[in-house]
Amino acid sequence: MSPPALPGDGRRDGDGPVDRLDEIASGFQAAKVLFAAAELRLFDLLREPGASAEEIARATGGSPRGLRILLDALVALELVSKRGESYRNRPEHESELLEGSPGHFVAMLRHRNRMFRSWARLEEIVMGGAPPVREILDERQANEDFIRAMYAVSHRRAGPLVDRLELRGVRAVADLGGGPGVYLEEIARRHPEIELYLADLPMTLEVARERLSRSAAGRRVRLLPWDLYGSPPPPELPPLDLALLSQVVHGEPPEANRGLFARLFDRIAPGGRLVVVERLVDKGRASPRDAALFAVNMLAMTPGGRTYTEREILDWGREAGFVAEPGEQVDEGASLVRLRRPRDSR
Ligand SMILES: C[S@@+](CC[C@H](N)C(=O)[O-])C[C@H]1O[C@@H](n2cnc3c(N)ncnc32)[C@H](O)[C@@H]1O
């Protein structure tokens, strides 16, 4: 017999309308327990041989009562095991939850905790309250967690995404708002002949530089500071055979993206492509579910972002002079929207 459903663990006792409502309403609890543990860096303290709540309280300066309750909830969520008074990470998840683990999942948890704090103001924002401040672009620790969180998502996508790019004959590629630079690093591994440019805000580039400097492929990527939405393209950027714009346009309103596409047109070589990678929403804007919820994330986290349909993105491109080419889905969170600058355009 399975144990009864725990509030927030996503399981339900029944299938009635109240159970469904309660499942939605309690979903934050398990998530917040995980965020708090990551924020307090508890998993590093729960390595072999483990520790008691009192020992962790002494090491962190936290409250023994608070820690015991939080640790017991982590046990209930099957992330931590408990023997007597001693708590220890369960081995299945430990490597993902330690600081500095290669997948950067802990940074993702801290980033989600910031999302959680922004989402707490949702009704106020919906009612026209002060727009969110973009701490993930302006504040150093928030930016570092954000960019490492992007790595946690995009490093698993790099292979399948790069498989879908047409790179034969391509000389220069830029990833605009390229964050951790994983796609360029993957291209560098496969195509030593291509020139690669990562354009992003200066703070993000520092996080990218530290990461890319660790691999020979990464060291081939040139870093260019560029505020895509606030200034013209830097003169060092050559005519591009391919510009990637991945998970960037959802952070800005349509007018800003229309302006960006118009500025980009001249930077793409005739015959070259602009490939936008986005979590697309359907025409009715209420599906897929994750895209509708992601629009809420942009409402909570940015002054003007949202999710877009493929048609909207293609229209900004057509208005700038590009022609549309068939798009394709990479995975549930990413589709390619392809635009080409005609060969005979000037
Ligand atoms: C959601 S992340 C996507 C990162 C990466 N392209 C990916 O797909 O994993 C958005 C990126 O856009 C960058 N960005 C946001 N506003 C920008 C701006 N005005 N100029 C340049 N980069 C910007 C952020 O620094 C961040 O790297």
Image: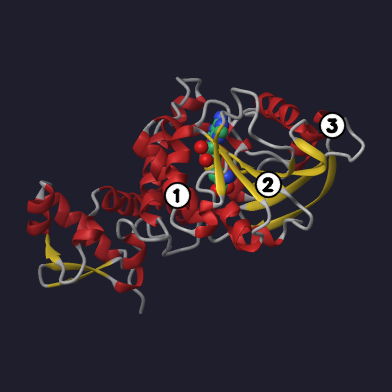
The quadrant where ligand 1 appears is top right
Say above or below: 11 vs 175. below
Viewer-closest of 274 and 314: 274
In the image, residue 18 lies at what x, y percent? Answer: 46, 52
Q: Which residue is mark 1?
A: 149
Would residue 80 appear left or right of 315 to someone viewing this image? left
Would residue 49 appear left or right of 341 to someone viewing this image? left
Q: How is the image coloured?
A: secondary structure
**Which amino acid type is marked by label 2?**
Val
Residue 21 is at least partly visible in this image:
no
**Which amino acid type is marked by label 1?**
Ala
Would residue 292 appear left or right of 11 to someone viewing this image? right
**Callout in the foreground (3, 1):** 3
Q: Where is the C terminus found, in terms of image quarters?
A: top right
**Which amino acid type is marked by label 3?**
Gly
In the image, residue 166 lies at what x, y percent? Answer: 76, 56
Helix, strand or loop at mark 1: helix
Q: Which residue is mark 2?
A: 173
Residue 124 marker: none
Residue 321 marker: 3
Say above or below: 327 vs 48. above
User: For the residue with label 3, is its CB less than 8 Å from the closest atom of ligand 1?
Assistant: no
Task: Name the residue: 58% across, 49% down.
Answer: 290
Residue 188 is at least partly visible in this image:
yes
The answer for how far apart the CA atoms under marks 2 and 3 are is 20 Å
In the rendered picture of this protein, how many numbered marks are placed on residues?
Answer: 3
**Callout in the foreground (2, 1):** 2
Task: Name the residue: 48% across, 39% down.
Answer: 205
Viewer-closest of 274 and 38: 274
Figure quadrant of residue 144: top left
**Callout in the foreground (2, 3):** 2
